Image (cartoon, rainbow, N blue to C red):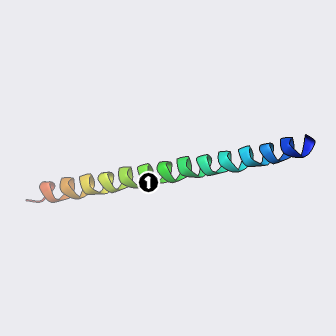
Amino acid sequence: MRKAAVLAGAALLALSSVAEAQYVMLARRAIGRVEQMSQQSQHVECSQSRP
């Protein structure tokens, strides 16, 4: 019984680590997209300000 509880706890811990890693990847992708859009916006502003 105790062995089953330990195995269940280890399985839940492993699953939570996978879920956390997915959120980290999603956050990094979102940050990258925001940076990309920001750079594109700055590029457009610079090219429009030239005479």
- Residue of label 1: 29
**Coordinates of residue 49 in the picture (x, y in percent):** 14, 54
Q: Which quadrant would the N terminus be assigned to in this image?
A: top right
Q: Amino acid at mark 1?
A: Arg
Relative to residue 21, is residue 10 drawn left or right?
right
Residue in front for this viewpoint, 38 or 17: 17
Image position of 3 with respect to 32: above or below: above
Q: Position of residue 48 (x, y in %)?
A: 13, 55
Image quadrant holding the C terminus, namely: bottom left
Left or right: 26 in relation to 39: right
Residue visible at 62% across and 51% down?
18
Secondary structure of residue under mark 1: helix
Residue 35 position, x and y percent, is 38, 54
User: Which picture quadrant has residue 29?
Assistant: bottom left
- Residue extending farthest to the right is 2
Q: State the image coordinates of residue 38 (x, y, percent, origin top left).
A: 32, 51
Q: Residue at x 48, y 53 (%)?
A: 28
Question: Dot 1 surroundings within 10 Å: few (below 14), some, or many (20 or more)?
Answer: few
Total labels: the figure holds 1
Q: Tell me where residue 47 sits by quadrant.
A: bottom left
Which residue in the rendered view is the most extreme toward the front?
1
Q: Residue at 51% of width from left, 54% of height from top? A: 25
Asked whether, in this view, residue 3 is left or right of residue 32, the answer is right
* Farthest left residue in view: 51
Of residues 44 and 33, which is closer to you in this image? 33
Q: Residue at x 19, y 55 (%)?
A: 44
Q: Is residue 25 left or right of residue 30?
A: right
